[in-house]
Image (cartoon, rainbow, N blue to C red):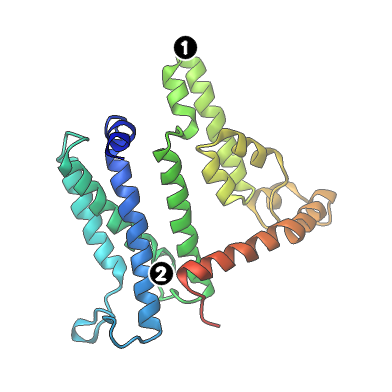
């Protein structure tokens, strides 16, 4: 195991990313267990941090950890050192705490246990997926291939095309496909070619009311997207807890 770690992580220059990923994942699981225990009012579990009666959300601690890890990491030059791993781990802890309350920050309201709070879990899952892809060596926007190209123009065309595919996919309302497509270009290409979701910017601009494309998009939303959303919510509830009401 140590030989694998030294070869695939340390020597490959992924020590910081690995440390970030592991602590990010562990912190998210821990904080979700913690808030669910608090929600159930388990007596032996420490409650919320409320000095002077003011509830301090864990996003505040996340910002502190992000500052410590981020600023400390800038001062570390050796990416394979113990200090580099520690600062990246601190940054992972902070990022998990912040993203777990991303919906609260977005709405400037305590929506943690509401349907709007699901957006935080979506954000965390997306961060885990993108970080995992980077850890296994997938190059975003095919930048690695572009840098390896002898022709600067060819490299620019590769990156530009991948950005275009990802942007079109996002405009079509396919957030997961668009963001993961940044790493997996064929996925972004498929998302860019297929119909956009009803209500997406692309649908508002390109699909007229009552048009054949809009009707097809609505049928696809009901037949495919809605069952996928229900399954995703089931997984979210299992991991992060079910919203109130």
Q: Few, some or many C-alpha atoms within 10 Å of disc 2 (few <14, some 14-19, many ≥20)? A: many
In this view, the residue in front, 23 or 54, is 23
Q: Quadrant of the C terminus?
A: bottom right
Q: Residue at x 66, y 59 (%)?
A: 228
**Is 42 located above or below residue 162 in the figure?**
below
- Whole-percent x, y for residue 114 in the image: 50, 76
Location of residue 137 (image quadrant): top left
Instruction: Decide: few, some or many residues near mark 1? Use Cα within 10 Å; few <14, some 14-19, many ≥20.
Output: few
User: Quick one: label 2 or label 1, which is nearer the N terminus?
Assistant: 2
236 w.r.t. 76: above or below: below
Residue 69 at x, y = what percent?
21, 51
In this orientation, which residue lies closer to the viewer: 24 or 208? Answer: 24
The structure residue drawn at horizontal position 37% and vertical position 62%, both measured from the top left corner, is 28
> Residue shown at 20%/48% (left/top)?
87
Mark 2 and mark 1 in contact? Answer it, CB < 8 Å.
no
On the rendered structure, is 243 left or right of 200?
Answer: left
Alpha carbon separation for disc pair 2 and 1: 46 Å
Please, which residue is most extreme toward the top here? 150
**What residue did someone put label 1 on?**
151
Residue 18 place in picture, x, y as percent? 32, 44
Foreground residue among 26 and 187 = 26
Q: Which residue is mark 2?
A: 104
Position of the N terminus, as image quadrant, is: top left
In this rendering, the count of numbered labels is: 2
The residue tagged with tag 1: helix, strand or loop? loop
């Amino acid at each position: 195991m140590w030989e694998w770690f030294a070869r695939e992580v340390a020597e490959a220059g992924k020590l910081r990313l690995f440390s970030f990923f592991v602590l990010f994942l562990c912190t998210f699981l821990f904080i979700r267990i913690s808030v669910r225990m608090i929600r159930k009012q388990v007596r032996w579990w420490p409650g919320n941090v409320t000095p002077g009666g003011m509830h301090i959300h864990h996003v505040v601690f996340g910002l502190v950890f992000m500052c410590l890890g981020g600023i400390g990491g800038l001062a570390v030059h050796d990416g394979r050192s113990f200090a580099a791993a520690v600062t990246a781990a601190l940054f992972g802890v902070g990022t998990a705490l912040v993203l777990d309350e991303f919906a609260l920050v977005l709405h400037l309201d305590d929506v943690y246990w509401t349907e709007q709070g699901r957006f935080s879990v979506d954000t965390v899952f997306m961060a885990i997926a993108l970080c995992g892809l980077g850890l296994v060596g997938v190059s975003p926007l095919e930048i690695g291939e572009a840098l390896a190209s002898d022709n600067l123009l060819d490299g620019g065309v590769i990156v530009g095309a991948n950005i275009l595919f990802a942007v079109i996919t996002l405009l079509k309302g396919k957030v997961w496909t668009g963001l993961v497509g940044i790493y997996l270009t064929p996925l972004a290409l498929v998302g860019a070619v297929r119909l956009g979701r009803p209500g997406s910017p692309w649908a508002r601009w390109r699909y007229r009311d009552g048009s054949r494309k809009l009707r097809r998009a609505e049928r696809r939303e009901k037949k495919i997207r809605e069952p996928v959303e229900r399954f995703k919510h089931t997984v979210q509830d299992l991991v992060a807890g079910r919203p109130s009401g």
